[in-house]
Amino acid sequence: MLTAMSDAAPYDPADYPPLAVTVDLVLMTVRDGRLTALLQRREYAPFAGYWALPGTFVGQEESLDTAAQRVLAEKAGMGARFLEQLYSFGDPLRDPRMRVVTVAYFALLPAAQLEAALTPRTDLVLAAVDIDGGAFGPDAERLRTAFDHARILGHAVERLRGKLDYSKLAFALLPELFTLGDLQRVHEAILDRPLNKPAFRRRILDRGLIEGSGLRETGKTYRPAELYRLRKLAN
Amino acid sequence: MLTAMSDAAPYDPADYPPLAVTVDLVLMTVRDGRLTALLQRREYAPFAGYWALPGTFVGQEESLDTAAQRVLAEKAGMGARFLEQLYSFGDPLRDPRMRVVTVAYFALLPAAQLEAALTPRTDLVLAAVDIDGGAFGPDAERLRTAFDHARILGHAVERLRGKLDYSKLAFALLPELFTLGDLQRVHEAILDRPLNKPAFRRRILDRGLIEGSGLRETGKTYRPAELYRLRKLAN
DNA sequence: AAAATAGTGTCTTTCAGACAGTATACA
DNA sequence: TGTATACTGTCTGAAAGACACTATTTT
């Protein structure tokens, strides 16, 4: 029986059971109006042929955030515009081989940037995801997900929706210059429902987070929209 | 250098560095109009004389939630009305003795219930907390907190505020029967600001989560308020 | 009656949804 | 000129803040 550590004298190493700790990354973007996450096909048992989140063991001298950034750099090449810890999962049976506690993170990237980083790989897919953690391939077929990763995906979508209105997270999914239409489509993809255009514009502009660039779209067959950018100011 | 595990063949135990994993608990209540958390005075180095959150090591065969419930039972006797994972902290230097990753939880209890469970102990205090993680003793003196526990406290207060409006968490801080005034005082303590009474009543009653009991307060020197209870219905 | 809080009515402001209209690019 | 989308004006309804008022209990 374990006892509460703050009751105890200084630790005896025999007192604590060492566990493996990993970080799993939900790397998301909005592509073609759908919220998607990067999944990797597993080659080996268990769950061979199933799709899993990219992850890594946490090193002995490494913080959780650093481990997450390391996974991100491996998959997407250095930068993400948004990286945040999501939730930790520690069911003793979540990995059938051994006891592993995982700390899930989620990261956001503009679609163009993420797709560019992925080109060489064939075992990676950007899967559309829903609030229940369901993942769907290019032909809308359901993908079988490994371990408890469906649950992690569901948490990520939920967090994204919850923070959309009061954070700057949507801008991490867009290039530096974007139109209000682009921004609305990102919001609609995350919330999975259409939004009222005038109300959306008013709400966004009233927040004062973005400013017009004076530039306009080009190459469109209809009236080009003004390009906005995130204001550089505080926080 | 570690490699992403989903690239690797089945684990070689030498591949992963085992870490100690603990659970720390922010056990909160509202007392005398102030949001407070349970802290325990540390007897031994490091941080002897400082105040720390109660915690425990996570057992080899034990889920994170179960470990949190175990700490809760040790401090408050079985029941909490609300227990939720908060955030994980894994800075390599957060504990000077050894590498410890901690998963923080927070739990809510009515003040009367928590105070009853605490009576025998003198090394425990219900400290008023603020959004910056500051902790204050019975005479409003600032308490020195151990490890990164101030940061954990700040996260807990922030989470509580964020979820107050769209969850039932406030009711976990009240007895089964309570007045609308009691409920408003709980909200005000968590948000640390006064609320408008008619607007508060309308908002709460329109949500339909509570129902009048037909009973009234007794023993008050002024008009007794109606006692409400949480409706037993769905979710 | 005084004191103290419970509980209500109503005015105003704010903000989102709805919807129709005008504006401007290219084919 | 047609078409597609950008952008705007305005009505309506929902909900919160402010504030004054009435109600009900004990002392």
Image (tube, coloured by chain):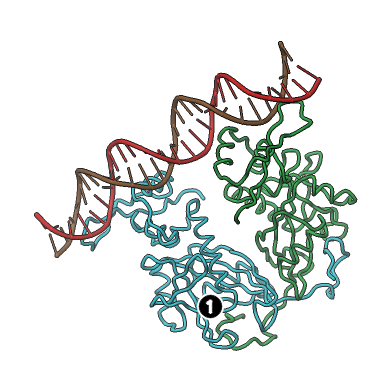
Chain colours: A green, B cyan, C red, D brown
Lateral position of residue B37 relative to residue A10, left or right: left
> How would you rate the neighbour count of disc 1 (Cα within 10 Å): few for under 14, some for 14-19, many for 20 or more?
many
Q: How many marks?
A: 1
**Image quadrant in which you'd find residue B85:** bottom right
Tell which of B29 and A201 is nearer to you. A201
Tell which residue pokes out farthest to the front in this image: A214
Q: Quadrant of the C terminus of chain A?
A: bottom right
Can you identify the residue that label 1 sits on?
A: B145
Measured as percent of width and height from the top left, residue B228 is found at 35, 53
Q: Quadrant of the N terminus of chain A?
A: bottom right
**Image quadrant in which you'd find residue D22:** top left
* In this view, A193 is above or below A233: above
Lateral position of residue B120 relative to residue A106, left or right: left
Tell which of A124 and A229 is nearer to you. A229
**The disc numbered 1 marks a residue on which chain?**
B
**Image quadrant in which you'd find residue D26:** bottom left
Lateral position of residue A167 relative to residue D11, left or right: right
Element at label 1:
loop
Measured as percent of width and height from the top left, residue A50 is found at 82, 53
Tell which of B52 and C26 is nearer to you. C26
Measured as percent of width and height from the top left, residue B198 is found at 34, 47
